[in-house]
């Protein structure tokens, strides 16, 4: 199943995954290498921290809700930004991921101190994530094999979904066959 993991794809937590860091989360894969591991950000975990409290100059460019998102449990003191680039060009210091989504060039070298006016005309939407999700080589494949994750295709609206808390159900609901039924699973499966 390792071939199913790809940059731009989604990892959707199965109801079986009860790790509080990933319970009912949707992860966008940003990097994947069979020998180097996998890196992604959780798309559906908005925090209570307003972007203006941490990065006030970027607030005007952030797509609602205007808060930092919890990108994952790794390096939560670092920031990563994702943006939709409608023009098809790569803004300075960013690299294209897939279908019009760009990410800051490298984790740890993010320059969110740069003037946001430089990017204002080049991006349509943006979200800022604190931390990221990471797996060593083979770790994610093992978790998929244990039934912890579904690997599905992403759609353009997933990264900037208007109601992030509903993204898990929305992604599952649009799948074919039995996987769509998982969207109806109650928050507490023992209550079923």
Image (cartoon, grey):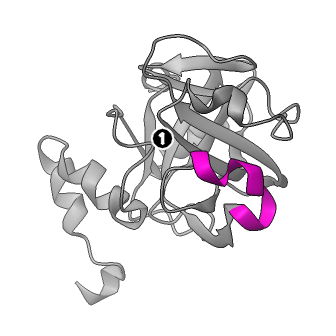
Residue 91 in percent (x, y) is at 64, 18
State the image quarter where residue 86 is shown: top left
The magenta-colored residue range is: 52-61
| Residue 4 placement, left or right of 62 | left
Secondary structure found at label 1: helix
43 w.r.t. 152: above or below? below
The image quarter in which residue 188 lies: bottom left
User: In the displayed structure, would residue 111 be above or below residue 163?
Assistant: above
131 part of magenta stretch = no
Specify the quadrant that holds the N terminus: top left
- Name the spot of residue 156 as percent of width and height, x first: 34, 33
Closer-to-camera residue (14/114): 114
- Of residues 186 and 47, the one nearer the viewer is 47
Horizontally, residue 45 falls left or right of residue 113, namely left
Residue 34: tell me if it is visible: no
How far across and how far down the image is residue 100, in percent? 45, 21
Query: Eyeballing the image, is 126 above or below 96?
Result: below
Direction from residue 134 to residue 40 in the image, left or right: left
State the residue at coordinates (35%, 78%).
187
Main secondary structure of the magenta stretch: helix
Q: Which residue is mark 1?
A: 145
Residue 175: in sight, yes or no? yes
Q: Characterize the local packing of mark 1: few (<14), some (14-19) or many (20 or more) Cα atoms within 10 angstroms.
A: few
Task: Please tell me how many numbered marks the rendered image carries.
Answer: 1
Give the residue displayed 38% in from the left and 51% down from the top: 161
Where is residue 10 shown, x and y percent of the image? 44, 38
């Amino acid at each position: 199943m390792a071939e199913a993991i790809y940059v731009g794809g989604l990892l959707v937590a199965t109801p079986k995954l009860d790790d509080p860091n990933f319970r009912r989360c949707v992860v966008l894969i940003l990097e994947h290498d069979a020998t180097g591991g996998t890196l992604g950000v959780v798309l559906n975990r908005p925090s209570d921290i307003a972007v203006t409290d941490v990065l006030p100059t970027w607030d005007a460019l952030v797509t609602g809700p205007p808060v930092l998102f919890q990108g994952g449990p790794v390096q939560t003191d670092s920031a990563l930004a994702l943006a939709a680039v409608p023009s098809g060009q790569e803004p300075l210091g960013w690299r294209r991921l897939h279908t019009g989504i760009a990410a800051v060039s490298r984790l740890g070298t993010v320059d969110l101190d740069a003037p946001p006016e430089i990017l204002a005309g080049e991006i349509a939407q943006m979200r800022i994530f604190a931390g990221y999700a990471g797996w060593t080589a083979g770790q994610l494949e093992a978790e998929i094999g244990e039934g912890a994750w579904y690997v599905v295709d992403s759609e353009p609206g997933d990264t900037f979904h208007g109601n992030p808390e509903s993204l898990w159900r929305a992604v599952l609901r649009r799948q074919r066959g039995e996987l769509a039924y998982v969207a109806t699973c109650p928050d507490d499966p023992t209550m079923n």
